[in-house]
Image: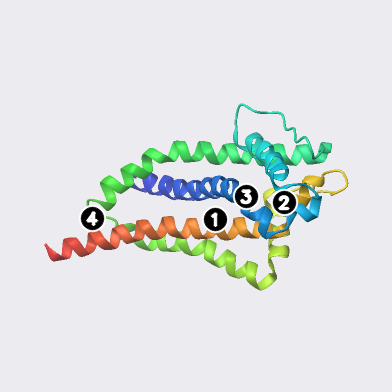
Amino acid sequence: MKDKLHFSLTVLFLLSFSILATIYLVWLFYPLEISWLHLEQAVYMKSSQIYYNFNRLMLYLTNPFNWRLTMPDFPSSKDGLHHFKQVKLLFHLVQLTALISLPSFFIFVKTIIQKGYGLLYRRALRICALIPAVLALVAGLIGFNTFFTLFHQVLFAGDSTWLFNPYTDPVIYILPETFFLHCFLLFLFLYELSFGALLWQIRCKNKRDRTL
């Protein structure tokens, strides 16, 4: 029973870790997005100015002690602030999940994988690793725009404030759909890499045990 609990929490940790790693890597590499997506032309601002406003947004979303969003060059409507608050709460939920599940991840690796019992969970881990790949396939078939819309309709059911009006919430100009596509692809890569690393450890442990 404890082993199954540690396994479930390990899956939650890998999921939350992949989300958090995506958030912080996107934050780090956002200047490249400004260049690739030509955001300077979209809002007629310098790259440094865009990045400064993006930093203010990300600090608000990720810092549990900051509950006031102010972007000097991008005013926000009541609906826009409401949506960002919902996103902030989700970010903090992911942060909390990662902290709570981290001990179980270490226990699972130490007491299950390193002791050679990882094969019992290999199939379940493969299924978990397959789910985002299926979602990516669906996104490819229906188009990322449709997938992005469905994702928000599910995640924010009954709340349409995520549909930003660029006239009242011009920050949407520096957060185009292609930017979120890049975020999704990065998350998919990190998620598959995390589960792949765990499956690789199980495979290597199994090989070592066979040679003994």
Residue 36, label in figure: none
Residue corresponding to mark 2 = 175
Q: Quadrant of the N terminus?
A: top left
Q: What residue type is disc 2 on?
A: Leu
Residue 116, label in figure: 4
Nearest to N terminus: mark 4 or mark 2: 4
Q: Could you say whether the residue bearing mark 1 is in a helix, strand or loop?
A: helix
Q: What residue type is disc 1 on?
A: Phe
Nearest to N terminus: mark 4 or mark 1: 4
* Residue at the image point whose x is 38% and y is 63% from the top: 123
> How far is disc 4 from disc 2 in space, using C-alphas?
46 Å
Residue 30, label in figure: 3
Q: Outermost residue toward the left?
A: 212
| Residue 71 location (% of width, % of height) | 75, 36
Nearest to N terminus: mark 2 or mark 3: 3
Nearest to N terminus: mark 4 or mark 3: 3
> How far is disc 1 from disc 3 in space, using C-alphas?
15 Å
Q: What residue type is disc 3 on?
A: Tyr
Q: Could you say whether the residue bearing mark 3 is in a helix, strand or loop?
A: helix
